[in-house]
Image: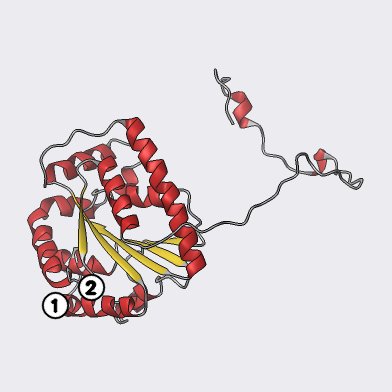
Amino acid sequence: MSGAQTPIADDVYEAELLRLQTEFVKLQEWVRGSGARVVVIFEGRDAAGKGGVIKRITESLNPRVVHVAALPAPTERERGQWYFQRYVAALPARGEITLFDRSWYNRAGVEKVMGFCTADEHARFLEQAPVFEQLLIDDGILLRKYWFSVSQDEQLRRFRKRRNDRLKQWKLSPMDLESVNRWDDYSRARDEMMAHTDVASSPWYVVESEIKKHARLNMMAHLLSTIPYREVALPQVELPDQPVAGDGYQRPDRGNYRYVEDYAATLPAATTGGA
């Protein structure tokens, strides 16, 4: 971890975030037009900031092109499948991007630490993961893997913040407590995972995420720099200067429909205008 940093100014952050999001729109259109397939893996400790980055990346993108895969715990049937099988179903088709909010690397982390898999299953995963990823790469998929790194103190601070925020309390779970109590176990599991799966053809990129805003910009800029996309000219849509005159259509009486009540009108009037 590098030395303490001073967070960038909010206006600088917002301006650069907008620029990067604009580039992601260009990336999306290039992927859609070229038929490329992109897979991005987001891994790291709980509260490391993975979800926040994914939210900023997808904010202005087309959900039909860019999919977020956040798979729940496997079902009983899925436990009887080849381990990678349910993740294969979430891989992108031509012209799509899949962002994995956690991925097959669950086996190298939480499953290993919490005893949800056997030692043999864990060892087999570490052996097979690079082979599986090489198959994806050989088939033309652009695969990128990011590990979000956060300190123990900062993780605990974020957990406390979640606990006190009614909008985020749902994010806390007994598993989060285990991630605090088993910090060293998770560290050892990460180190072993890196030793086996950080390979030249499919490397891990570590994102320092003590400062969330820095982590978002750093990760987004890096991902864009690794993909040879280009801006694709979009078709120009011509709009009339004014509404087109109708052909005599008469709208039915409003009383025929159930309109949502104007709840907003019961609130205090705003001091400034806005859309």
* Way the structure is coloured: secondary structure
User: Compared with residue 270, is residue 170 higher up or lower down, i.e. above or below?
Assistant: below
Disc 2 residue crowd, few under 14, some 14–19, many 20+, Cα 10 Å: few
Residue 213: x and y, percent?
29, 41
Residue at 32 percent of width and 56 percent of height: 225
| Nearer to us in this view, 155 or 208 | 208
Which element carries disc 2, helix, strand or loop?
loop
Q: Which residue is mark 2?
A: 201
Measured Cα–Cα span from mark 2 to mark 1: 21 Å
Image coords of residue 100 (percent x, y): 34, 62
Q: Quadrant of residue 74?
A: bottom left
**Label 1 residue SS:** helix
In x, y percent, where is residue 45?
20, 54
Task: Looking at the picture, tell me which residue is in the foreground, 102 or 38.
Answer: 38
Give the quadrant of the C terminus. Answer: top right
Horizontal side of residue 106 vs 96, given as left or right: left
Q: Are marks 2 and 1 in contact (CB under 8 Å)?
A: no
Task: Name above or below for residue 112 compared with residue 3.
Answer: below
Query: What is the quadrant of residue 261 in the picture?
Result: top right
Q: Position of residue 180 (x, y in %)?
A: 14, 50
Q: Nearer the viewer, mark 2 or mark 1?
A: 2
Q: Amino acid at mark 2?
A: Ser
Indicate which disc, 2 or 1, sits on the residue closer to the N terminus: 1
The structure residue drawn at horizontal position 64% and vertical position 53%, both measured from the top left corner, is: 236
Which residue corresponds to the image point at 41% horizontal and 61% vertical from the top-left?
Answer: 229
Residue 111 figure quarter: bottom left
Q: Which mark is residue 123?
A: 1
